Structure formats: C-alpha cells, structure tokens
C-alpha cells in the first residue's frame, strides 16, 4: 500500500465511494467533489468493484485499467484517493466486506465512514449483502443526481423504512443530499459513443486520451 493511501485511510472525515467506474467520468468526480465540500471531508476513497453484485452479466474493462483511469481522473484533488481493495479480493465485491476491512485498518475508535450512494442504488438497496450491517457500520449519503432517473426519493425512503428495520432505514433519509447542479454524464452513454466511433462527452481529458490510446470500449 502506498504511503499516500495509508495516510488517506487514517483521515477522520472519510467517505467510501464504490462503483464500477467503467469508465470514470466527470459526473462521478462532480458528486465526490460536492460531497467532500458539503461534508467537509478529508478523503474520498474511490473504490472500484472487481465484480459488482448489482451489475452481473456485463463484461467490464479490467479492474487495473479502471483503477488507472480513476487515478488520472482524481489526481487534481488531494482529497481523492483510489483504493483497490475490491480488485484484490476474489468474488463479488460486497460493500460490507470493504467497510469491515476499512474498520480493521482504522481501528474501532475511528468512527464510521460515510458511504456515498447514488439515489439510483436505492431500489435494490434492501437486497444488498448484509445490508443491515452496511447501515450499522457506515453513514450513508444518498446523492440525488437530479433529472429523470425514475426514482422518487420520498417513495423510496418510505419503501425502505417498511422493508428494513426502521431505525436503520431512516439513516438513508437523513443522509439525502440533492445536488444543486446535477451532472448529465453516464458511463453507459460513454461506452455507447465509443463503440459507435463517436467522440464521448464528459470525460477528463487525461482519461479520454488514455482510452483513445488503448482503444478501450471500441
Ligand atoms: P453505468 O452507466 O455503467 O451504470 P454508472 O456511472 O451509473 O454507470 P457506477 O460507475 O457504478 O455506475 O457509478 C457509481 C455511482 O455513481 C452510482 O451510485 C451512480 O449513481 C453514481 N453516478 C453515476 N453517474 C452520475 C452522475 N452523472 N451524477 C451523479 N451520480 C452519478
């Protein structure tokens, strides 16, 4: 582990931000920046999943490439760090395992990390592996990217409060963070554009150049 990552993992105000990041785009960086500013975070740990339990059945770019692109996209902000813990762990990347590893590294007294979630994660959230432990061991922040993603936050929080122990589910509602300026980037749209030979929007220039160099997603 690099000295930079070791230091980042010990910061008091720390958030985990997991996802596929296939590829990382300016929308991801935007929500991490907003969360870091609003919550006064010292560290945002971008944690790419080896194999997302939520996106089975689709091939992704390799974990090491996705991590390399993440490092390029996050290099400008000293609060950002890429943590490859899920890439080095076999099997589906369960968030609860990552939170436990973080807890072991930080020690019990360090307090719970924030957990950055997109609002679009909520419809399946109650089926997450050991979801109650996820909520016991972290402080969820639910970022509403705005626009038409088909998820009604208030209805979704009501549903989760019925599906899960109310005390835990209410943490999600309390962690709701609507963005003042939603970001239109979508990794699905970026992959579609690249496969069609079109110029993709909403990529960091260094990420765009590396994707072109390696002819990724073509
Ligand atoms: P895909 O299109 O491949 O499903 P994705 O960006 O939605 O890509 P992930 O890479 O797993 O999927 O995203 C990680 C998290 O970032 C998710 O919680 C998602 O809600 C959030 N997210 C993705 N794009 C944006 C955006 N433009 N604005 C705000 N949040 C976003």
Image (cartoon, rainbow, N blue to C red):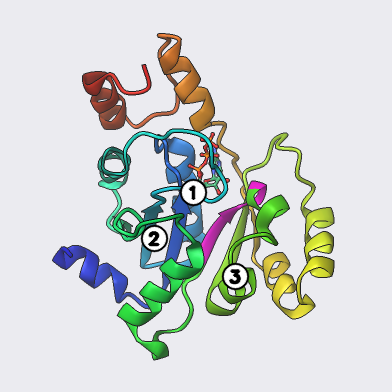
The response on whether ligand 1 sits within 8 Å of label 1 is yes
Q: Earlier in the sequence, mark 1 or mark 2?
A: 2
In the picture, the disc for residue 205 is none
Q: Residue at x 69, y 35 (%)?
A: 147
Q: Residue at x 32, y 43 (%)?
A: 63
Q: Which residue is mark 1?
A: 52
The response on whether ligand 1 sits within 8 Å of label 3 is no
Depth-wise, is mark 1 or mark 2 nearer the camera? 1
Relative to 208, is 62 above or below? below
Q: Earlier in the sequence, mark 2 or mark 3?
A: 2
Relative to 192, is 45 above or below? below
Number of numbered callouts drawn: 3
Q: Residue at x 43, y 75 (%)?
A: 100
**Mark 1 crowdedness (10 Å alpha carbons): few <14, some 14-19, many ≥20:** many
**Please, what secondary structure does the residue beneath circle 1 have?**
loop
Distance of mark 3 from mark 1, alpha carbons? 15 Å
- In this image, 86 relative to 64: left or right? right
Stretch in magenta: 115-120
Q: Which residue is mark 2?
A: 44
């Amino acid at each position: 582990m690099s000295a930079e990552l070791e230091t980042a993992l010990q910061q008091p105000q720390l958030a985990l931000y997991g996802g596929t990041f296939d590829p990382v785009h300016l929308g991801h960086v935007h929500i991490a920046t907003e969360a870091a500013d609003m919550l006064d975070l010292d560290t945002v740990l971008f944690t790419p999943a080896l194999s997302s339990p939520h996106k089975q059945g689709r091939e992704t770019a390799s974990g090491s490439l996705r991590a390399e692109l993440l490092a390029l996209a996050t290099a400008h902000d000293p609060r950002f760090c890429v943590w490859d813990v899920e890439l080095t762990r076999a099997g589906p990347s369960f968030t609860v395992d990552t939170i436990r590893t973080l807890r072991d590294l930080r020690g019990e007294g360090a307090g719970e990390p924030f957990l950055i979630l997109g609002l679009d994660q909520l419809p399946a959230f109650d089926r997450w592996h050991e979801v109650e432990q996820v909520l016991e061991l972290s402080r969820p922040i639910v970022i509403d990217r705005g626009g038409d993603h088909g998820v009604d936050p208030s209805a979704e929080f009501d549903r989760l409060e019925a599906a899960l122990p109310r005390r835990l589910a209410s943490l999600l509602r309390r962690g709701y963070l609507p963005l003042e300026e939603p970001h239109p980037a979508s990794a699905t749209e970026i992959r579609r554009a690249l496969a069609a030979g079109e110029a993709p929007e909403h990529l960091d220039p260094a990420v765009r150049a590396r994707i072109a160099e390696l002819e990724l997603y073509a």
